[in-house]
Each structure stands twice: as C-alpha cells, then as structure tokens.
Amino acid sequence: MFASAAGCSAELGRASRLQRRAGVARFASWNLHWFPDGKPGKSEPGAGADLLWLACALWWLDADVVALQEMKQTPAAVTAAERLVSELNRLSGSHYELRLDDCGKRVPQHVGLLWNAARVRASDVATVAALNPSGEPCAHQWRPGLGARLRFPGGLDLEVISAHFKSMADQRSLELRRTSFAALGPLLAATTQRTADGDLLLLGDLNTMGCDSCSPPVSAGDELARVEQLLGAGALRVVPADAPGSHFHDGRATLLDHALAARGMLELDRSTRTRVLGACAAGAPPSANRRAAKQARRRLSDHCPIVLDLHDRDLD
C-alpha cells in the first residue's frame, strides 16, 4: 500500500481497505511534507506528491476525519488539493471536504482538516490561535491549529484539532513546543465552557524530537515524557502509539506524530493505541522499511500516517 503506487492500486482493485470494527469513528493524521511539492519552492517535473497514489492511500485508511499538516496554499497547491479531494471522492464514493487554516501567505505551511461529510457533520471550523507559541495565529511563520466541532451518526460528538508544533532539536524550539503544549489545558477548559462538553482530540505532528544542543541533551523520549508530565497536571493525555517512530530521518524512525485526548473522554478506551502505518508500522521488517520509506518519502511524505478509532457513541 505505501511501498508503491502499483501496490496501492492492487489493493484498490481488491477493494481491500484498513480493517475497522462496526460502530467506530476513525481519525487519522498525516504530515504531507510540503504538499504538493515535497519541499519549499516548486518541485521538479516528476517529483512532489503523486496525487493518485496519495488519494489511494487515503481511501485505504478509511478515515472519517484526517488531520493534515505541511499543506501549502499557493495557487498551484490549492489546485493540487482540489484534485486530491476530487480523486478521493471518486475512489470512495463519498463526499470529503477540506479546510485549511486562514493564515494565507503569512505562513509557508498550513494545517488542515479533511472529513467525510457523508458521515461527519462539522461546525465551528476555525483557526486555533493559542497553539502558535506567540499567541497570535499566524505570527513568526509558526502555525496555529485548526479546530472543528464534529458529530457522528452514532452520537459521538467532540472537538477535533489538527496541530503542527515547532520543529528542530535546539533549546529555543524545545521551549516553543513546551509553550504550545502548555496552552492545551486552558484550551480544553475554554472548549468545555463553550460547548458544555469536555471531549477533545488533538492530532498532528508535534515534533517531539528532543534537544541535541541542550546541556544535558534531551532525547525524543525524554521530551515526550516531559510532555506527559506537563499534561498530567491537566486533563489531557498522550495516547500511546504501537510503534517507536512515525518519521524517517537518516534511516532512523522517531515518534513525532501523536494523538492527545481528554482524560475523561469515555469514547476512547484506555487500552487503545494509535496505529502507525506505512514503512513505520510496528512489526514491519527493517529492510522493507528502508525500501518502502525511500519511495514513499519521494512521492507521499517523509511521515507515516497514524490512525485512531473511537466508539461512535455519546458516553458522557
């Protein structure tokens, strides 16, 4: 599926999608690596996102909602995104809709939400300024979040946010990420007051890569442990992943992409883990990882998608 466009097409021909139980709502998150060019600036001919392969991979995930990161908003990027959604709708027979944050040219990368409007009713779609470390939605070319209130056919309703925190493994970037994480507690409190419902799910590339230049250095695992401690003082938790990495760099996988959930959200079982897919998937042979990651990095993304299923019921 993620090793080649031909492999994905074969799964499509068999109508073989990622298995899901009845009665669940499926969420995914995927950093699409400077979509559609695969880098800052324009891509060379034959490079950048393979829109048909990407649409096929999204079809296979069978997600009701996908949090997206690293989306461009140039005219060419907007056209590519429209083509991607159109192809996904053709493959799925559904009606997906895409919204990005409203920062426009003020930031080079954007966060977005893609949802299946045939299954999900979205309202109050809005940029979340508090997740930009400056507190201003589009300042310093850092990213805000994009949030929406979602309701599913079985009764599940919750606030969902797509997020992309500051990258780089230096002390300043580590502190900026901590500022974004620290904003989550007040954000949950404000959401609960506004909606009278404390169900919140945040998905995205949170860049928990540690700090190489700190003294002593902070490993990626150390940073994630600090995040869990910080969130532990509030009402949110990091949903554990089933694999040690979601992003490939220099042949090594690091867990940068996460799901954060309100602790009191009963629709998410405590034992549930986010599933990391593609070349990063748990149990995939290292040799297969390298081959798949090389091709996927070039035409899909250097990140692997993550998936999380919740009960489609209102349990609180």
Image (tube, helix red, strand yellow):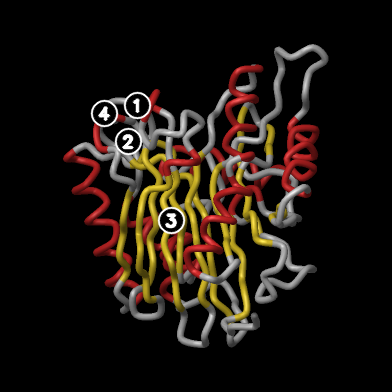
Mark 3, secondary structure of its residue: strand
Is the C-beta separation of discs 3 and 4 under 8 Å? Answer: no
Is the C-beta separation of discs 4 and 2 under 8 Å? Answer: yes
Is the C-beta separation of discs 2 and 1 under 8 Å? Answer: yes
Judging by the rendered image, the residue that carries numbered circle 1 is 40
Mark 1, secondary structure of its residue: loop
- Label 2 crowd bin: few (<14), some (14–19), many (20+), radius 10 Å: many
Estimate the spatial distance between the alpha carbons at disc 2 and disc 3, rounded to whole Å: 25 Å
Q: Percent position (x, y) of residue 247?
A: 60, 39
What residue is drawn where x is 67% and y is 31%? 209
Estimate the spatial distance between the alpha carbons at disc 1 and disc 3, rounded to whole Å: 25 Å
The amino acid type found where label 4 is placed reads Lys
Q: Is residue 18 above or below residue 204?
A: below
Say the numbered circle drawn on residue 271: none
Say the numbered circle drawn on residue 42: 4
User: Which residue is situated farthest in the right direction here?
Assistant: 216
- Mark in front: 2 vs 1: 1
Q: Is residue 32 visible?
A: no
Q: Quadrant of residue 72?
A: top left
Judging by the rendered image, the residue that carries numbered circle 3 is 147
The amino acid type found where label 2 is placed reads Asp
The amino acid type found where label 1 is placed reads Pro
